[in-house]
Image (spheres, grey):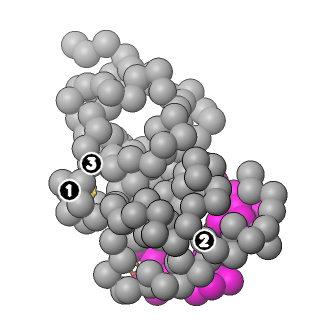
Amino acid sequence: MNEPITMQLNGTTISWSGSPQRRLLDLLRDDLGLQSVREGCGVGMCGACTVQVDGQAISSCLLLTGQVAGRQVRTIEGIGTPESLHPVQQAFIDHAAFQCGYCTPGFILTVEALLREIPAADEATIREYLSGNLCRCGSYNNILAAVKALQSGNYSPLG
Ligand code: FES
Ligand code: FES
């Protein structure tokens, strides 16, 4: 019998008793129904499964549930609301920074982390920071434009 594991998920404490060897991606998507956490490659190469753990963007396909015990996990459901979008979400819409949207939750979580960690990142740094997130639709230039608009203060405050 596995001991219960507890984490903070989008500001709410949750506990579960599954195997600590289970991938965080599977817990979030299959058990908790957070379909925004998507599986692409399954091996840490595409960023579709990106979540934030203690504020850092990370691939949930590479994390085991036992590794997030006691930590804060955030998915796109923890950023903004349908009535009040987060500035990063609004900037993505305004700059058409997606087409099919499959990669978008992961990109938004990574961009939000970037703007907190390196608010004045130059273009090369932005591209490097986002290099773990792939977009099969090729929205990279529009995503870059959204990030630059956010940096310019058009969408402040970032919260
Ligand atoms: S599914 Fe996790 S990085 Fe691709
Ligand atoms: S918008 Fe389709 S994969 Fe990025």
Q: Residue at x 56, y 67 (%)?
A: 122
Does residue 77 appear to the left or right of 105 in the view shown?
Answer: right
Q: Secondary structure at mark 3?
A: helix
Gap between marks 2 and 3, in whole Å?
Answer: 25 Å
Circle 1 crowding by C-alpha within 10 Å: few under 14, some 14–19, many from 20: some
Q: Please indicate, yes or no, whether residue 76 appears anywhere in the rendered image.
A: no
The disc, 3 or 1, on the residue closer to the chain's N-terminal end is 1
- Residue type at mark 2 is Val
Pointer 3 residue Cβ closer than 8 Å to ligand 1 = yes
Q: Badge 2 is on which residue?
A: 147
Q: Residue at x 26, y 25 (%)?
A: 20
Gap between marks 3 and 1, in whole Å?
Answer: 6 Å
Pointer 1 residue Cβ closer than 8 Å to ligand 1 = yes
Front-most of residues 105 and 159 = 159
Q: Residue at x 64, y 80 (%)?
A: 93
Q: Which mark is residue 42?
A: 1
Figure check: 53 above or below 106: above
Gap between marks 1 and 2, in whole Å?
Answer: 27 Å
Q: Which residues are magenta?
A: 78-102
Pointer 2 residue Cβ closer than 8 Å to ligand 2 = no
Mark 3 and mark 1 in contact? Answer it, CB < 8 Å.
yes
Q: Badge 3 is on which residue?
A: 61
Figure check: 15 above or below 101: above
